[in-house]
């Protein structure tokens, strides 16, 4: 029997994404988000949800752009730190030693050391209550060659992305391949 846990944000797992923006003074900033994901295929769009009181909120609203840098498991300490401290009180790039790289496509920085980057132009915001959902059209995705497979796709076994368990506040890694998409379910399809 299933036990009710109540109305909570317990969707498992959530991604560990680091959102980059320039603040009003032009200082590069980053914050870790877990309330995020893909929200449209055509045009390609992602969404990140941020509270209004966060330093990144005003920056994204003003610049109408943000980036998503996806850390690997080796960068868990950096990803955790940038989610704990406000950019209004700390230069998170300087503290962590990470490199802000100015996007050539959108008015936002990304993390040079993180293996995958998504550059986004803000197309819509949705006020949801505690959070505002930022919907960004993907202008480009950049990936280190070392995390690409022979077909040019990101290989999760090479990327080793972090995932987050919101209720327990724990970071996990991804496991082995379980099945191929659009293949495992074929046993239920009529021929």
Image: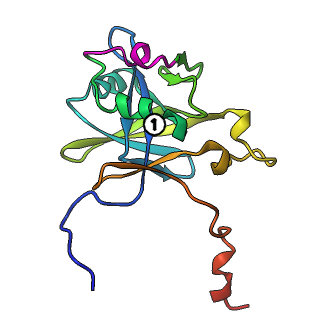
Question: Residue at horizontal 22%, vertical 60%?
Answer: 8
Quarter in which the N terminus is drawn: bottom left
Question: Residue at horizontal 54%, vertical 45%?
Answer: 161
Rendered image quadrant of residue 4: bottom left
- Measured as percent of width and height from the top left, residue 35 is found at 35, 47
- Measured as percent of width and height from the top left, residue 150 is found at 81, 47
The residue positioned farthest toward the bottom in the image shown? 190
Query: Foreground: 73 or 87?
Result: 73
Above or below 151: residue 27:
above
The residue singled out by tag 1 in the image is 76
The residue positioned farthest toward the right in the image shown? 150
Above or below 22: residue 166:
below
Question: Residue at horizontal 62%, vertical 68%?
Answer: 178
Give SS at disc 1. helix
Q: Is residue 97 magenta?
A: yes
Query: Foreground: 182 or 157?
Result: 157
Rendered image quadrant of residue 21: top left
Q: Provide the residue span drawn in magenta.
A: 89-98
Question: Residue at horizontal 31%, vertical 52%?
Answer: 166
Above or below 72: residue 114:
above
The residue positioned farthest toward the top in the image shown? 25
Disc 1 crowd rating (10 Å Cα; few below 14, some 14-19, many 20+) is some
- Count of picture labels: 1
- Name the side, left or right, on which 177 lies relative to 33: right
- Measured as percent of width and height from the top left, residue 163 is found at 45, 50
Q: Is residue 173 magenta?
A: no
Rendered image quadrant of residue 50: top left
């Amino acid at each position: 029997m299933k036990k009710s846990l109540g109305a909570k944000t317990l969707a498992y797992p959530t991604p560990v994404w680091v959102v980059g923006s320039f603040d009003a003074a032009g200082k590069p900033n980053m914050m870790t988000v877990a309330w995020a994901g893909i929200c449209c295929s055509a045009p390609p769009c992602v969404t990140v949800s941020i509270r209004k009181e966060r330093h990144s909120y005003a920056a994204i609203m003003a610049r109408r752009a943000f980036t998503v840098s996806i850390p690997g498991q080796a960068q868990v300490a950096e990803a955790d730190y940038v989610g704990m401290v406000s950019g209004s009180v700390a230069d998170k790039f300087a503290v962590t030693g990470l490199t802000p790289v100015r996007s050539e496509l959108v008015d936002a920085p990304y993390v040079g050391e993180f293996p995958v980057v998504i550059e986004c132009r803000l197309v819509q915001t949705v006020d949801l209550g505690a959070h505002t959902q930022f919907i960004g059209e993907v202008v480009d995705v950049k990936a280190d060659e070392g995390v690409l497979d022979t077909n040019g796709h990101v290989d999760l076994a090479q990327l080793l992305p972090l995932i987050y368990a919101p209720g327990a506040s724990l970071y996990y890694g991804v496991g082995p391949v379980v099945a191929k998409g659009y293949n495992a379910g074929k046993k239920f399809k009529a021929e």
